[in-house]
Image (tube, helix red, strand yellow):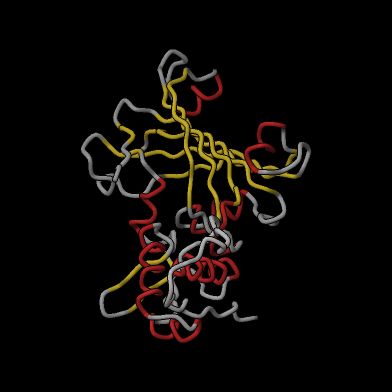
Amino acid sequence: MNTPTALDEPPTPSTPSTPSTPSTPSFSPLYQQIKTLILQSLQAGEWKPGEPIPSEMDLAVRYRVSQGTVRKAIDELSAENLVVRRQGKGTFVATHAEQHVQYRFLKLVPDAGDPNIEGPAERTIVDCKRLRASADVARALGLRTGDAVLQVRRVLAYAGVPTILEDLWLPGAPFKGLTAERLRAWPGPMYALFETEFGVRMVRAEEKIRAVLPDAEQAALLAVTSQMPLLSVERVAHTYHDMPMELRRGLYRTDTHHYRNQLG
């Protein structure tokens, strides 16, 4: 694999800029350039989820910058949950197999407030099929109408009570070989399956939330009446460089759970 182009620390100017110096509004700080190079290595799979990345000193030598510049880049990657610092051990690529990362994307918690109180959800894969993308699905995933996509429907139950109904659409090419059988056999979170088996790591998501009434099929799958209000959550999840990789539409029961989002 080719090593990304090294960068030199910019020299401290000895004289002020003259009026003839061209302006550079697109200039990005050096630590941001280092962050971009590290992101490129993460996207290329040079360091896998759960594996350590090189030390700050090694990265400073690699990119020919100061250790402080590397530290600032890693600070931002850590704040964005792309890497995890471990005291005395180093910095590791974040993985959806980790507990705190799992709950970063699952926001429905029991009214008691502790997401661990119920244990893992009981998952039922209702359907998994390949089809052609409709216009709205294609738009969300950056595809063309009619491109191949994979649609998954599943129900998550807590303490035997069906609580979440989810429909997912995934671009066909990156998820070739994903079947209902593989989904049922996987013991961990779905995003951990995506990163482990398909090399796709979800790093960011956007959501839209509204209250809706279910149709007859949705009400039956969630064991509610068609007059029970549900929380509708539409999410587009992105991998590195803001590439959309999943459209997810979920219906959430909130009679014993609530949607919790931590700000700041």
Q: How many marks?
A: 0
> 106 or 84: which is nearer to us?
84
Q: Toward which corner of the image does residue 76 lie, by quadrant?
A: bottom left
> 201 or 254: which is nearer to us?
201
Task: Return the x and y of residue 167 as percentages of the image width and height.
Answer: 56, 36
Question: As displayed, is residue 193 above or below residue 132?
Answer: below
Task: Return the x and y of residue 135 as percentages of the image width and height.
Answer: 71, 32
Residue most toward the right?
Answer: 146
Q: Toward which corner of the image does residue 118 lie, by quadrant?
A: top left
Q: Residue at x 51, y 74 (%)?
A: 47
> 11 or 33: which is nearer to us?
11
Residue most toward the front?
Answer: 19
Q: Residue at x 43, y 85 (%)?
A: 58
Task: Return the x and y of residue 173 as percentages of the image width and height.
Answer: 72, 54
Task: Return the x and y of residue 220 as percentages of the image width and height.
Answer: 50, 23
**52 to the left or right of 240:** left
Question: As displayed, is residue 148 above or below residue 54?
Answer: above
Q: Residue at x 39, y 59 (%)?
A: 81
> 135 or 264: which is nearer to us?
264
Residue most toward the top?
Answer: 227
Residue 8 visible in this rendered orientation of the protein:
yes
The N terminus - image quarter? bottom right
Q: Residue at x 69, y 38 (%)?
A: 138
Residue 1 visible in this rendered orientation of the protein:
no
Question: As displayed, is residue 180 above or below residue 37?
Answer: above
